[in-house]
Amino acid sequence: MDRKVVMLTKDRLSAQDVQKRMLEMHKVSVEIFVDVADLLDGISSGKLGEDCYYLDDTIKDRDIRTLLDFIQRSGLSGKVLLFVAANDADYFTKLLEAYPKLGLTLINMPASEKEIVTRLQQKLQYDKSVKKPDTKYSLNTSFMKVILDCTEQALSEMLGDASISHEKPQLSYEFKENEEIKLRAQITINSNLFRGSYFMSFPEKTYLNMYEKVVGEKYNTIEEANYDLVKELANIIYGRAKSILNADEKNLSVAIPSHYNVMVESTDIVIIIPYRSRFGSFFVKIAPNLF
């Protein structure tokens, strides 16, 4: 078995039938996704080894374009086969115009599972130019767990009962801060454990609420006079993480935290962890290869 199809669809039952037929009839494996974020995570981790993508119109246009944008940005154009299953030819034409270099192929819907299998297999069989890309990025899971634990511990000790909790990590193919973010701490790390940046991003109201709690001074805006808390927090978090990981012989390098009150952007993969607290929301972002 040396070929693989990835399906992005909400119609799991039909996809499972295609999956079964492809495996039994053609020895081609099929992996099914219903969420574009999970699929992007799989691609970025390098675990899929995919040759072909199948997207259908049960997926929102926004999510289809998110995936196609990622494929285009990642240099996968021409290296993987791309099928779009839709019953609206005008919609497919718009995708062709938006992504002329991706080589999109239309599967007219409705189509039976047997017809879908035939179209996929014919293309896989005769297109011998498909090469499996290497899209791995640098992220050590032990580093991520430790630094997130240290983030919550440091904030809880500083703020007392802050009712801090985080949501499920999200994957983004680009780093573009929300305009509500007014201050961020950045720790740049370059070591064999992790290469990239750790960010804490604060909306103004959240940061000022935390500042008043810790320092006892009230401000109406973020300004140079109250930057000190975010710098101290970044130092504490990284110091704790470094101590834990180095004790485990992970050899985390020395890093100098910095802070910004301007937008930070990158086109690389970013792991985003939204946090909630009684002082307001904030975000932790792990950005491999962003310095």
Image (spheres, rainbow, N blue to C red):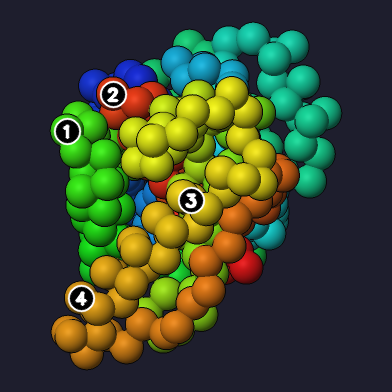
Foreground of the two, 261 or 36: 261
Q: Is residue 27 visible?
A: no
- For label 2, the residue is 278
Q: Is residue 183 visible?
A: yes
- Say whether residue 132 is left or right of residue 154: right
Q: Residues within 10 Å of mark 2 (few under 14, many from 20)?
A: some
Of the numbered discs 1 and 4, the one sitting upstream in the chain is: 1
Judging from the image, what secondary structure is the residue with disc 2 in?
loop
Q: Tell me, yes or no, whether the two marked residues, 1 and 2, touch with CB atoms within 8 Å.
A: yes
Compared with 219, 122 (above or below) is below
Query: Mark on residue 244?
Result: 4
Compared with 194, 158 (above or below) is above
The amino acid marked with disc number 1 is: Asp
The amino acid marked with disc number 4 is: Ile
Write the residue at 25% across / 78% down. 243
Write the residue at 41% across / 65% down. 235
Foreground of the two, 110 or 260: 260
Q: Tell me, yes or no, whether the two marked residues, 1 and 4, touch with CB atoms within 8 Å.
A: no
The amino acid marked with disc number 3 is: Val
- For label 1, the residue is 161
Judging from the image, what secondary structure is the residue with disc 4 in?
helix
Q: Residues within 10 Å of mark 4 (few under 14, many from 20)?
A: some
Task: Give the CA separation, mark 1 to mark 2.
Answer: 9 Å
The amino acid marked with disc number 2 is: Arg
